[in-house]
Amino acid sequence: MTGEAQLASGTGGWAGRLRLLRSNLSYFLGELRRQPLALVGGVVVLAYVLAAIFAPQITSHDPFQGNLRQRLRPPAWAEGGNPAYPLGTDDQGRDLLTRIIYGARISLAVGLLSVGISVVVGVILGSLAGYYRGPLDNILCRFADLLLAFPFLIFAIGVMAFLGPGFANLIMALTFKGWVEFFRLVRGEMMAEKTKEYVEAAKVVGQSHPAIIASEILPNTIQSVFVLGTLRMGYMIIMEASLSFLGLGIQPPTPAWGSMVAAGRDYLLTAWWASTLPGIAILLLVLSINVFGEGLRDILDPRLKIE
């Protein structure tokens, strides 16, 4: 094949891929418009992401430094409120809106990292166990069953008590058990797909087992993994907030929603906003992620059922 022919072939290949990508994106957006709740959830999640990214441009207050003269100032719409602090201030005189926005960075980072690592570990182990079976499958399944015997929050509390508080330790605690759901999903999909005709055809033409797993079977399971990952992200954010609330997660003065709720609970009768508004931020984000994830499940993989 000449250089010009190769270039034309490569150009046509990329053009075909772009057309396929546009077609799939158009189909996805069209289906998403038919599910208004999922669409609203996606918009809310996108708003949180943009607020976390552009936090310095949204607010000029320092999330760490406060002004004790403005301590426990009510929201701007309430009596005694200051327009410079739209959602009021906390017990250290720090702007609550600023800390909520910067707290979104922590929650989203924990959710993305913990789910991302869990996906990688779960997909690799699930693929190996489901395809090869044998002793490896038995060992991994028994270990997964052992982890499932412990409630997630109790298990995470125990791990954090052993490792100590901190962002890196929090990610480790959440992923130490978080991979199990993805392992079980991919293992089941792998066992079901490996007996189908296209896998047998790949073996006949001489493809290796790793190539069959990576190029033939995994692409047929990626939609289920993506949907499950979206749904589990909200759960990981709840776990992070719970551990921070108990003092085992992100430590003050770093703005984390769970620790903000814990710090404000002593002033519920006199300064309800200090604890209530960060709690509402958690509620809205997790609810939006779950609603969006349910919509994705219906669009991408209607067969997927989450226990």
Image: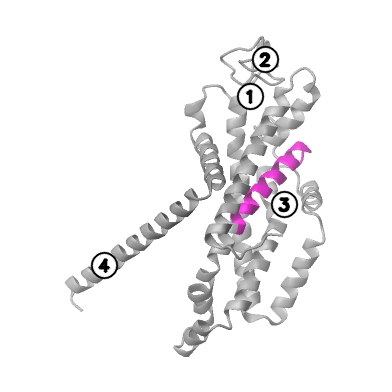
- Name which of mark 3 and mark 4 comes first in the sequence: 4
* Separation (CA) of disc 4 from disc 1: 54 Å
Location of residue 88 (image quadrant): top right
Q: Nearer the viewer, residue 163 or 116?
A: 116
Query: Element under label 4?
Result: helix
Q: Closer to the observer: label 2 or label 3?
A: 2
Residue at the spot of label 1: 96
Residue at the spot of label 3: 173
Q: Is residue 273 left or right of residue 86?
A: right
Residue 12: assigned label:
4
* Separation (CA) of disc 4 from disc 2: 62 Å
Above or below, comparing residue 295 to residue 248 in the picture: below
- Name which of mark 2 and mark 3 comes first in the sequence: 2
Residue type, numbered disc 3: Ala
**Residue 84: % across, % down:** 56, 15
- Looking at the rendered image, the quarter that the C terminus falls into is bottom right
Residue in the image at 66% along x and 13% along y = 70
Residue type, numbered disc 4: Gly
Query: Element under label 3?
Result: helix
Residue type, numbered disc 1: Leu
* Separation (CA) of disc 3 from disc 4: 47 Å
Above or below, comparing residue 12 to residue 210 in the picture: above
* Separation (CA) of disc 2 from disc 3: 36 Å
Residue at the spot of label 2: 73
Q: Closer to the observer: label 3 or label 1?
A: 1
Q: The magenta stretch spans which residues?
A: 228-249
Residue in the image at 77% along x and 17% along y = 270
- Name which of mark 4 and mark 1 comes first in the sequence: 4
Mark 2 neighbour class, 10 Å CA radius: few under 14, some 14 to 19, many 20 or more: many
- Name which of mark 2 and mark 1 comes first in the sequence: 2
